Amino acid sequence: MKRILAIDFGLKRIGLALSDSSQKIALPLKTIEIQNPNQDVSLVLKAIQDRLTDIETVVLGNPLLLSGKKGEMADNVQTFKEKLEKKLNNPLISVVLWDERLTSAQADKMLKKDYNRKKRSQIIDPVAATIILQNYLDSKSFLNNK
């Protein structure tokens, strides 16, 4: 079975997480520092280039407002999604948006007891991507078992 990649998109940093081959467990992968917003997709593709043939789905965190409405950041994510799909140019890899409300806060809370603020800021993005991915995998598993 192929793997699923999750992306926690940010304007300064992007967190990546990858599923195991059974698509049951999400694992943090890496943080990508963004210097130039025009290079965000290229940097992500460069970071996963060795794994690209092993990925069937990209789950992109969709930062909806608590009300469920789209805000400015959700518009940025939609633009990133469109650029990613265009650069991937691969009908075998689907890119899906997944509700990520409060995942960064959840990741921060998880890391708070073991890491100081500076260290948390360095590792929080792939942890948030891991939470997004695990939620997606759990949902997928639940729907398949109904």
Image (spheres, grey):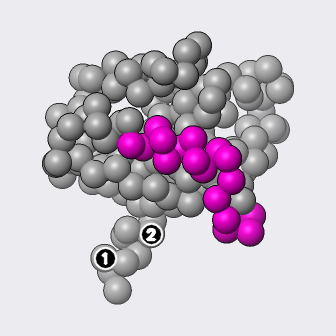
The picture places residue 78, in percent across and down from the top left corner, at 49, 47
Q: Which residue is mark 2?
A: 139
Residue at x 45%, y 65% (from the top left corner):
138
Q: Main secondary structure of the magenta part?
A: helix
Residue at x 25%, y 41% (from the top left corner):
55
Residue at x 63%, y 29% (from the top left corner):
11
Give the SS element for disc 2: helix
The picture places residue 129, in percent across and down from the top left corner, at 54, 43
Find out whether residue 78 is within the magenta segment: yes
The relative height of residue 45 versus residue 61 in the rendered view (above or below) is above
Give the SS element for disc 1: helix
Using the image as rendered, state which of residue 21 and residue 100 is in the foreground.
100
* Numbered badge on residue 144: 1
Q: Quadrant of residue 136?
A: bottom left
Find out whether residue 129 is within the magenta segment: no
The picture places residue 98, in percent across and down from the top left corner, at 50, 58
Q: Quadrant of residue 88?
A: top left
In the image, farthest residue toward the top: 35
* Numbered badge on residue 86: none
Residues packed near mark 1 inside 10 Å, few (<14), some (14 to 19) or many (20 plus): few
Amino acid found under the numbered disc labelled 1: Asn
Measure the C-alpha gap from mark 2 to mark 1. 9 Å
**Magenta part of the protein: which range?**
66-82
The relative height of residue 140 versus residue 23 in the rendered view (above or below) is below
Report the quarter where the C terminus lies: bottom left
The picture places residue 16, in percent across and down from the top left corner, at 48, 34
In the rendered structure, the answer to whether residue 135 lies left or right of residue 55 reads right
Residues packed near mark 2 inside 10 Å, few (<14), some (14 to 19) or many (20 plus): few
Amino acid found under the numbered disc labelled 2: Ser
For the question of whether residue 20 can be seen, the reply is no
